[in-house]
Image: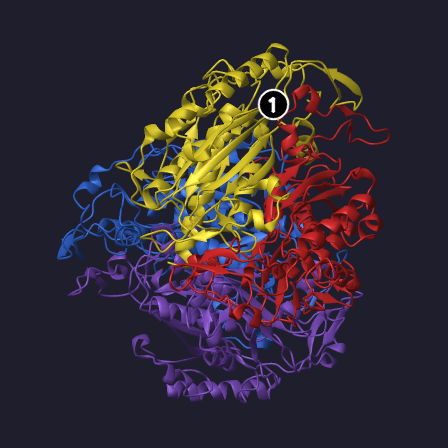
Chain colours: A red, B yellow, C blue, D purple
């Protein structure tokens, strides 16, 4: 329990940053869907370390092996087993700090929880864990596209205090992939790169914000009470490493508005029985259920905890105050690599709710 | 599926705003815990409409009946059935708008989902639904206190653009209950009241932000990947009606910080094996697991969608553009009544993870 | 956890034999289905004590109140809350034995599990608990009939060593209800009645076997590995009080057959793409998935544990050997009342799998 | 959904008989438990084809790779990923029958369910699927032994009409492993072998019954209503391929007994607060909860469906009547290899309930 996500389209992941590998089992995949394995690999490549000088230099090809669940390129409906081997694990960087809790890492909490810890890397708490969900999410994206036509796109909208100017309706995949920051505002992207380089050069790190949109989402997804669509999206996105905040639609800004400003008036759409809303402060969900408008949201990521500076901590063995200066290979800013993670989680949530809706309502 | 919450301490709720009543079934409650039924009723009274002139005038005593699961004042370990009757349902206010979708309400999405809708009120989408979770949360609070000593407190920290100045460490229950806004900053509370009155006098509504803290939370709660403590908290809180944003610890502000600013240095605590952190930007969770520090977060609520003004919408029967001017009894601002809802959801999440931790680790 | 059953069509029950009442919450019900509330009550009447002189004389009208989830006679898709009050609870019969564990009852195990026990009746372990599932199952039967046309029928096929001669294909509801034993073989039924009377007259009890068949079950229900249709049926039926054995199709008898005897040859059905099998040793499931043939099975029930005879046991307070001679109102044979329970559980399992199948496969 | 089993100690499996391999992910394993990997392999060797002349000659080493979740030989509490590669898959044997449904196999039902099928073997319906659960069960056995001392032992008690005479209390692992039938009654074992050889020589197959016992099970495991210990055991065991019947304790025989015969009188045990029962017709569970006595049960297996004889069936492409005469490598009798499968499922159920009990009750 705890490594699974989803009710009908359900993934269960395993693996640590140092060990035999990572993987996922997908249960409940609709049968007969053609899967493009290269497209799966491409998502992993977007998440991969070493893809640009702005991210961790750890060298991992992150080649995914699909162990089961496909036959002649199509889904069988049986579980899809995915395996990604660890190739460039390097426990030596951790040897010197194995008895010192890294500040704002999960070293202490893992030990507080389990009483045992694989100190050769971050274990399950490493962002490397996300390779499994990105692989599974890449399959979810394809199934979602095949059965309802939904598309999910995320991008970087802030790094540190550098904020981009972006109209979500105009963002294309090409714009996002046009620069290593994955920010569709080219001017802001350049500033962001400088901000990341500056952080890295001082052994420091910097946080950021990712924005996302899902289009062509059918109206009627989500459950009215606990499994509101935004609640499940919040859970999925707040389960990403380093995330500290979540917004749907107007988000925190909405809390300072009045109802007459915030309400989204309906208007008819010619040739359709589904109306549209003039504004979209709701972010595509009302009462926890999708209304057919684009679903939009944002996720805040804190700066990466591994900084190459001396810090104060306590000893895992004696409990006494000690200092620590981590080594290893880490990202100065996580958000460019987090873009495919965000897309994966959004796709997993939406597909699960598509299947739930047709299960209950037909 | 969809009306349940939690894995080991699990609640399942039922009921609509207009109908026989609302209720919850609690499964997995630890046995032998003394339950103070008056304290349960007191939480319902905090959530009740009609408690002040700032909230909806609907008159509901919200008396809870405990149908099962207790014997001589103690929990049996068997399911606790809770029932709260509807007393003051008034479908007549809905008669005139039953074929017009209220903007930013769940009227349209409910119909898009199910193809059928009880138009005599908001059904499951009504905030009245939360009476069941507040009742269940009131029991969770008592069990949590009894078995690990955790306390949960929430308060209003913003209404519209009025923000309070509050040091979370100093907030007491008495301070929160001292005014009908449930804002421990008395000066801000007065301004907030004026803001709410102003909105109400113009048939409008206003949003706000609730802050919360959980203290005496044992280190080690939460699961490293999908069931991170903050992910489950996000789900629980984003499942509250009208919520649009969630933050844990530093939240969105944390995304503009550097790692050297954001990292929480550890320091030893005399006489304890659990260290403390000098700052608490993490909000009490690291890698999804509690670290023993106070868990802190914020939830943003949009302005209530029912405004007593003319608005544009479409007809549920013809699909044509029509105008709507809702009637009925509604809150000009939801946040004072949402305080016990937030506390309930936080308590439900924490207690579930307490049981999960002792299940897996002992 | 533990009082819920089903994944998509899910019921959660509560209540003890002595207390405010019993009930169930149904989640995931398809919307827009007309529900005949009298038919629900009729199923409860079949399960009710006091319906004949062969069963417990406890007088319970078992009137069900539907608290939510219906509007103008149709399901809303929201949770259906069901409540059945206890009317004739009589704790006085238990006063004298409250500190003596009744042999083969759950008194000792309940206390071993929870450390606390409501001694005023059997609590959750009382067969009275099944009133909630029969009510929920009565709704499941109607939904199942409405969306796929499946019918479920059970009957008594053995009491003690009295076995009926029955061709499952010929059994009708009228035949089952024609006598208080609910055995469609009238001759055997008379013998069974005599057997039950004899047991009752000596303060003893007697066991029996129930057989059931589900017809018009679509091919394709069930999951190939853990959630095989027969596995979920086994779980559902073995969760009934006093059940000790489960068979699907050929059951234990099948283990002494050869493959050439047991295999069910396929043959085409004119005008249908679904073949039929010449024999049905499989009992309608192959590899855990329904094949379109009638699903058939049997459940063995032990004799009721409450016998009005002196027995040896231990004291709950001192642990010493003591004797016990229970009083109260109990059934000399549970199987006539268990017929609607079996039907309810079969219907709940099948409907859940119908929704699961259309969720995954569409 | 559908390939997972258990609530707290949860396994999720994947893989088909022909493809990249099979595996399991174990979630919720208690941390810090020493795992003997050779003992895991030994269980797989007991299940392996080709281990004697009485079973399928398919040559699979079934070497298990543990991909994650262990560190220095101990469990981390994180998911344990298990992988067993397919080595000797031979789709050619299926080529000639790919468009003819094998009688009593899952060929037809798989296609009815998913509309697509990997005809190169039985896919998920192949008994090869059980390799994953035996591996996971082998870990469960070790954890169970380490934390509560429970032992699980199964054996063959009938093959065709050959029944063994066995006192469950006297069976040892050595007695079970002393002959390739895994029947501790040596005389019966010899007869059984002859029966299997006879079946094989005529291209036929034969069914059988497995009996099992779990000793040193703490009192208090199991939940009173749907998750009764026997209900979860029934589900687990009826999810094994080819199982047709399940009994706990007295089973079907119990249905012909009277209460005065069947009731298990309690008697004190010197030096213990847990009494014992003089008889054990209950099979160690009362009201769904373990009572501290040995838990005993039986599972009936039908004869293997693959017989090397001509049979009647229908064409998957034209629907017309055709004959089929399967080839390939199959077991003439499944029960010797099913012994470790039964033990694995029993261990998985019991361990899950051990964790559930300490989660709820502490």
Q: Is residue B134 left or right of residue C107?
A: right
Left/right of residue A332 with respect to residue D185 in the rendered view: right
Disc 1, SS:
loop
Q: Residues within 10 Å of mark 1 (few under 14, many from 20)?
A: many
Residue under the image location 58 percent in, 54 percent down: A305
Quadrant assignment, res B69: top left
Compared to D245, does C361 lie above or below?
above
Tell me residue D290's x, y (percent): 33, 59
Asked if residue C149 can be seen in this view, the reply is no
Q: Is residue C111 above or below residue A272?
A: below
Chain under disc 1:
B
Q: Which residue is mark 1?
A: B160
Q: Quadrant of residue A20?
A: bottom right
User: In this orientation, which residue lies closer to the viewer: C226 or D104?
Assistant: C226
For residue B182, side relative to residue C87 (left or right): right
Q: Which residue is painted at 62% across and 17% down in the image?
A: B94
**Whole-percent x, y for residue D151 in the image:** 36, 72
Q: Position of residue C335 (x, y in %)?
A: 39, 51
Q: Pinpoint residue B48: horizontal percent, then vertical percent.
A: 46, 22
Q: Is residue B66 left or right of residue A326?
A: left
């Amino acid at each position: 329990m705890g490594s699974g996500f989803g009710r009908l389209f359900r993934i269960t992941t395993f693996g640590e940053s140092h060990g035999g590998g990572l993987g996922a089992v997908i249960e409940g995949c609709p049968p007969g869907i053609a899967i493009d394995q290269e497209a799966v690999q491409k998502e992993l490549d977007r998440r991969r370390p070493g893809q640009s000088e702005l991210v961790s230099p750890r060298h991992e090809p992150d080649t995914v092996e699909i162990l089961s669940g496909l036959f002649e390129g199509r889904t069988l409906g049986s579980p899809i087993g995915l395996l990604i081997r660890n190739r460039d694990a390097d426990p030596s960087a951790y040897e010197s700090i194995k008895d010192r809790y890294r500040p704002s890492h999960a070293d202490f909490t893992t030990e507080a929880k389990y009483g045992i810890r694989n100190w050769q890397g971050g274990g399950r708490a490493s962002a490397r864990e996300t390779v499994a969900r990105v692989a599974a999410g890449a399959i979810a994206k394809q199934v979602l596209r095949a059965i309802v036509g939904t598309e999910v796109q995320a991008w970087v909208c802030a790094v540190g205090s550098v904020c981009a100017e972006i109209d979500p309706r105009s963002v294309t995949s090409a714009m996002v992939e046009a620069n290593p920051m994955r920010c569709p505002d080219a001017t802001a992207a350049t500033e962001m790169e400088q901000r990341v380089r500056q952080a890295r050069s001082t052994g420091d790190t910097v946080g950021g914000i990712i924005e996302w949109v899902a289009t062509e989402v059918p109206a009627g997804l989500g459950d009215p009470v606990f499994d509101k669509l935004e609640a499940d999206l919040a859970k999925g996105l707040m389960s990403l490493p380093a995330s500290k905040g979540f917004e749907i639609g107007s988000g925190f800004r909405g809390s300072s508005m009045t109802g007459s400003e915030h309400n989204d008036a309906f208007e008819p759409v010619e040739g359709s029985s589904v109306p549209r809303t003039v504004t979209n402060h709701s972010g595509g969900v009302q009462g926890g259920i999708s209304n057919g408008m684009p679903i939009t949201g944002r996720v805040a990521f804190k700066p990466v905890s591994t900084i190459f500076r001396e810090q104060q901590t306590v000893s895992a063995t004696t409990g006494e105050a000690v200092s620590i200066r981590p080594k290893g290979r880490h990202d100065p800013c996580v958000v460019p690599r987090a873009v495919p993670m965000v897309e994966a989680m959004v796709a997993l949530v939406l597909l699960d709710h598509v299947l739930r809706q047709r299960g209950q309502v037909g």
